[in-house]
Amino acid sequence: DSGVTQTPKHLITATGQRVTLRCSPRSGDLSVYWYQQSLDQGLQFLIQYYNGEERAKGNILERFSAQQFPDLHSELNLSSLELGDSALYFCASSLELAVTLDEQYFGPGTRLTVT
Amino acid sequence: AQKVTQAQTEISVVEKEDVTLDCVYETRDTTYYLFWYKQPPSGELVFLIRRNSFDEQNEISGRYSWNFQKSTSSFNFTITASQVVDSAVYFCALSEAGQGGKLIFGQGTELSVKP
């Protein structure tokens, strides 16, 4: 158990809908990362927050957004869902801003299925 | 540009065999970090090792060992005396200093260890 929690574990929804994925980092960790794992794209970095501020952005679609709250938990919002958004979404956390100082620990993931 | 290549998509071995998983990376930075993660059938990503670009010493942890060679831009992972529990998808990842926590993953190598 990495100490990172994600809810829900599974989510099934229809195209065009909006969903929110939630992540609670390990106790004391300030950085939160979101990754998407799909069969065609593999594991891709989406976005990083550090202590409430966005710090790095990857290939995140405009339909997707995220935030980190004062209690350090984070939410990933996916809107206008398409079939291609079906994937496993991971949250990871680390104490520091950069991997130069600390490794990332991953949560169990949320499996999103868009029908 | 950053890139990680794991040319071996699938490997199948018989228990007790040694197996090496290859990882080749591309980066223009002189300071970077390399990682290996394990994804067992249950789906979570488990951190195995982090190595910085200035430390080319090989590392051994039990049956696991890692060979980092900057001259060939490779960071290979060897499992000695493989066991059925080693069956998983293994990912190599790269992060450049100054890129925050962004991890660039390879496509993964699926290892199947048969009894």
Image (cartoon, grey):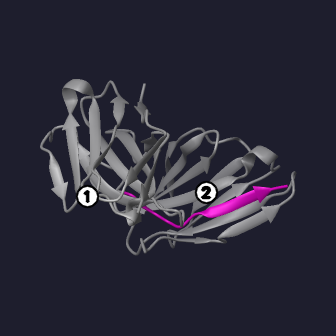
Residue B108 visible at all: yes
Q: Which residue is mark 1?
A: B81
Neighbour class for label 2 at 10 Å: few (<14), some, many (≥20)?
many
- In the image, residue B11 sits, relative to residue B4, either above or below, namely below
Q: Position of residue A65 (x, y in %)?
A: 67, 51
Whether the magenta-drawn stretch holds residue B93 is answered as: no
Residues at circles 1 and 2 in contact by the CB criterion of under 8 Å: no
Residue occupying the point 42% across, 32% down: B5
Residue occupying the point 71% across, 59% down: A112
Residue occupying the point 37% across, 72% down: A28
- Residue type, label 1: Ala
Residue occupying the point 80% across, 58% down: A18
* Image-quadrant location for residue A6: bottom right
- In the image, residue B8 sits, relative to residue A9, either above or below, namely above
- Residue type, label 2: Tyr
> Which image quarter is the C terminus of chain A in?
bottom right
Q: Position of residue A77 (x, y in %)?
A: 70, 57
Q: Which residue is mark 2?
A: A89
Chain identity of mark 2:
A
Start-end of magenta stretch: A104-115
- In the image, residue A46 sits, relative to residue B39, either above or below, namely above
**Residue at mark 1 shares a chain with residue at mark 2:** no
Say which mark, if any, is on residue A21.
none
* Image-quadrant location for residue A114: bottom right
Q: Nearer the viewer, mark 1 or mark 2?
A: 1
